């Protein structure tokens, strides 16, 4: 799912996500738990301010962010 992301750009463009939107809902990134490079982009496993974990992918060649996976803690605790 294509998403909008506000990212930190230090010495590199879109170095890491700091905020992202799913539909009309904004989420602030509280921590980046993991980061890795795949053949199709850079992946970030982040914990957002809602307590859930999300995997975001940044495709550098097209400058597009996508939501690859999310986990809802509320569902797993039931």
Image (spheres, rainbow, N blue to C red):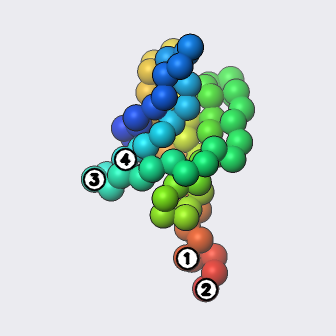
Q: SS class of the residue under badge 4?
A: strand
One can see residue 59 in this view: no
- Distance between mark 1 and mark 4 Cα atoms: 20 Å
Task: Please determine whether, in this image, residue 12 is positioned above or below residue 31.
Answer: above
Q: Are marks 1 and 4 in contact (CB under 8 Å)?
A: no
Instruction: Residue at 55%, 41% (x, y): give it.
Output: 56
Q: Would you say 9 lies left or right of 42 here?
A: left
Task: Please determine whether, in this image, residue 36 is positioned above or below residue 62.
Answer: below
Q: Residues within 10 Å of mark 2 (few under 14, many from 20)?
A: few
Instruction: Residue at 59%, 71% (x, y): give it.
Output: 73
Q: Are marks 1 and 2 in contact (CB under 8 Å)?
A: yes
Q: Which residue is mark 4?
A: 21
Q: Which residue is mark 1?
A: 74
Q: Which residue is mark 3?
A: 24
Instruction: Residue at 46%, 31% (x, y): give it.
Output: 7
Q: Earlier in the sequence, mark 3 or mark 1?
A: 3
Q: Are marks 4 and 3 in contact (CB under 8 Å)?
A: yes
Q: Position of residue 11 (x, y in %)?
A: 56, 14
One can see residue 55 in this view: yes
Residue situated in front as seen by the camera: 54 or 61: 54
Q: Which mark is residue 9?
A: none
Q: Residues within 10 Å of mark 4 (few under 14, many from 20)?
A: some
């Amino acid at each position: 799912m294509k998403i909008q992301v506000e990212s930190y750009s230090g010495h590199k463009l879109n170095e890491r996500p700091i905020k992202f939107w799913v539909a009309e809902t904004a989420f602030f990134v509280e921590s980046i738990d993991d980061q890795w490079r795949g053949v199709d982009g850079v992946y970030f496993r982040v914990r957002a301010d809602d307590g859930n974990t999300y995997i975001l992918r940044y495709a550098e060649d097209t400058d597009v962010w996508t939501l690859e996976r999310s986990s809802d803690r509320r569902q797993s605790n039931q």
